[in-house]
Image (cartoon, rainbow, N blue to C red):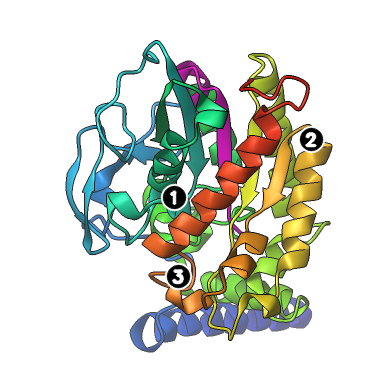
Amino acid sequence: MKKGTRGALIVVGTVLAALVGAEIWLRAFRPVQHREPLERSTPPGVTFHQVSAVAGLPFELVPGAHGQYAGVEVKINALGQRGPAVERAKPPGTFRVVAIGDSLTFGYGAPQEDLWPAALERILQQDPALVGARSVQVLNLGVSAYNSANEARVLEAKALDLDPDVIVVGYFLNDPQVAPLQALQRWFREPELWEHSHLLRLVDAWRFARAKDRHGNDGYRYLHDPDGGGWAMVLDAFGSMHRAASARRIPVVVATLPAFAPRADWKTYPWSDLHEQVIAGARASGLVAFDTVPEFVADGRRPQDLCVDYEHPNGAGAEVIASAVAKALHELLLRPADGGPR
């Protein structure tokens, strides 16, 4: 064997030994949780979710599931929606709203009566100017850990078949997330080969941290980078929503929902520019869009008084969201020309 070849083999062997040693050390002493494949035990929430038969949806709620989830009682109706039993066919004389979204719409950590779709139904039931003499149904198709692409598929494959008068999409600031970082997202997918390596997951975690650092270590800003794949996915999803709903002449309203990080008041809310970016993107795609934060500013209570954690509203926060949505529906559906419901 030539001297140069022998030296190259020694270098390669040394590098491989170092990599294997690093992998073994990480597994033994510093396991990497970033994008870690989940063991096939039952993590929280899986008993309420199943593999979806809808292409483009990794999972969905289990029809008829009932039990404790995130510390509260959760009931899933026969149509696979959180909420009371309803018929798929819209009853005559009914004004039906379909709400789509992620865990903020599903109501993570909140009882049924404290969800913003439930609060919206109560508000609209007392609103004859909008609904006339019709009864009101607000159906909740929210599912934890969905992103905008998932929500577009829900609209196309589920919401339209429910014959809604209007669809409301609750948009949260992690909706551009493409990488499977949440437990439910990792559970309902086969891990990529590289994800079995602690060392490669560490490298990916480092890459992810560096990307966030370029956006002030702010994950929400990283996700909304105009040149990023997550934001491109959101715009594609908005376009899909518009094409599907406009074919049925059903209006779609995108409501940007806030994060409840601890602050003295809502006037210092740091992500209003991201809300404006989402609203502009939704409107450019032909959707109606508005921000719920002004309603929180007008309400006057502190962010931490309106949430169960820094991302999910409690009953009081849900009422504020529902009030903002009701006002947006007034502007969309009431026409000055006739002063009556659409």
From this view, report whether residue 207 is shown above or below residue 102.
below
Q: Residue at x 28, y 60 (%)?
A: 39
Give the numbered dot on residue 285: 2
Location of residue 25 (image quadrant): bottom left
* SS for callout 3: loop
Disc 1 to disc 3, C-alpha distance:
12 Å
Give the numbered dot on residue 306: 3
Location of residue 333 (image quadrant): top right
In the rendered image, residue 241, in percent from the top left (x then y), is placed at: 66, 30
Residue 161 located within the stretch drawn in magenta: yes
Q: 242 or 191: which is nearer to us?
A: 242
| Residue assigned mark 1 | 116
Q: Residue at x 48, y 32 (%)?
A: 98
From this view, report whether residue 111 is shown above or below residue 128.
below
- The part of the chain drawn in magenta is 158-173
From this view, report whether residue 210 is shown above or below residue 315.
below
Q: Point out the tag, 1 or 2, that comes first from the N-terminus.
A: 1
In the rendered image, residue 243, in percent from the top left (x then y), is placed at: 71, 23
Residue 13 located within the stretch drawn in magenta: no
* SS for callout 2: loop
Q: Of circles 3 and 2, which is in front?
A: 3
